[in-house]
Image (spheres, rainbow, N blue to C red):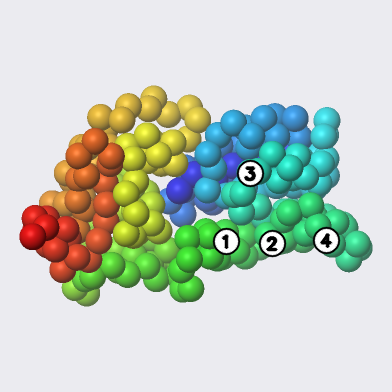
Amino acid sequence: MRILVVEDDRDLNRQLVSALEDAGYAVDRAFDGEEGHFLGDTEPYDAVVLDIGLPKKDGVAVLEEWRGAGRKMPVLILTARDRWSDKVQGFDAGADDYVAKPFHMEEVLARMRALLRRAAGHATSDLVCGPVRLDTKASRVVVDGNPVKLTSHEYRLLAYLMHHVGRVVSRTELVEHLYDQDFDRDSNTIEVFVGRLRKKLGVDMIQTVRGLGYLMTPPDAAELARKPAR
């Protein structure tokens, strides 16, 4: 999952990016409203952490322009303001949630997990598909109760597919959502990561849909999908 952090305080920006990356996300950063608006308007983020008090263009204006342009990614706003009217203004502009400064980083991570799972239609922090269980809170994967050790990129790929179980996901979409802006992107690496995931999971759940991409389904559904129609 790919996140954008828009925060002008460089120390706080660094702390947020570090915490999100440690939690398994690909993260881009911006330090003012104009840069943040441009990235959010041109890149396919899964969610955004957006400060309200930004230089060049304030966060409310940035959010209003995103929503006016049809950008639907979940947005968590950060504010140092205590007045309830500022929070209302943020929600009216299209925010999905907020955290008031100062905050505990664990709260930001928990709210981000909640935004992402709600956006994908999941109710809990555990994503389950057949024998595979992914705990988004602990960044932990188990198959039939047995832990599976994954690299950061393998985990991101599995997490994205499990957030979108039952939907064909193209290679292009995976590249756009798994890597940050500075990563040397190559869609061929997706095939490598998928191959590694299949071996480590040990269950046939990630199907290649020729010419379209990949589909994650429970084992029984995957078996049915391979059977020719009568």
Q: Residue at x 52, y 48 (%)?
A: 46
Q: Residue at x 48, y 73 (%)?
A: 123
Badge 1 element: helix
Counting residues from the N terminus, which is met first, the one under dot 1 or under dot 4? 4
Determine which residue is flagged by label 4: 87
Badge 4 element: helix
Determine which residue is flagged by label 1: 115
Q: CA distance from mark 1 to mark 4?
A: 17 Å
Q: CA distance from mark 2 to mark 3?
A: 16 Å
Q: CA distance from mark 2 to mark 4?
A: 9 Å
- Mark 2 or 3: in front is 3
Q: Which kind of residue does numbered mark 1 sit on?
A: Leu
Determine which residue is flagged by label 2: 97
Question: Residue 13, image x and y in percent?
Answer: 66, 42
Give the total number of marks visible in the rendering.
Answer: 4
Determine which residue is flagged by label 3: 71
* Quarter placement of the C terminus: bottom left
Q: Which kind of residue does numbered mark 3 sit on?
A: Arg
Q: Are marks 1 and 4 in contact (CB under 8 Å)?
A: no
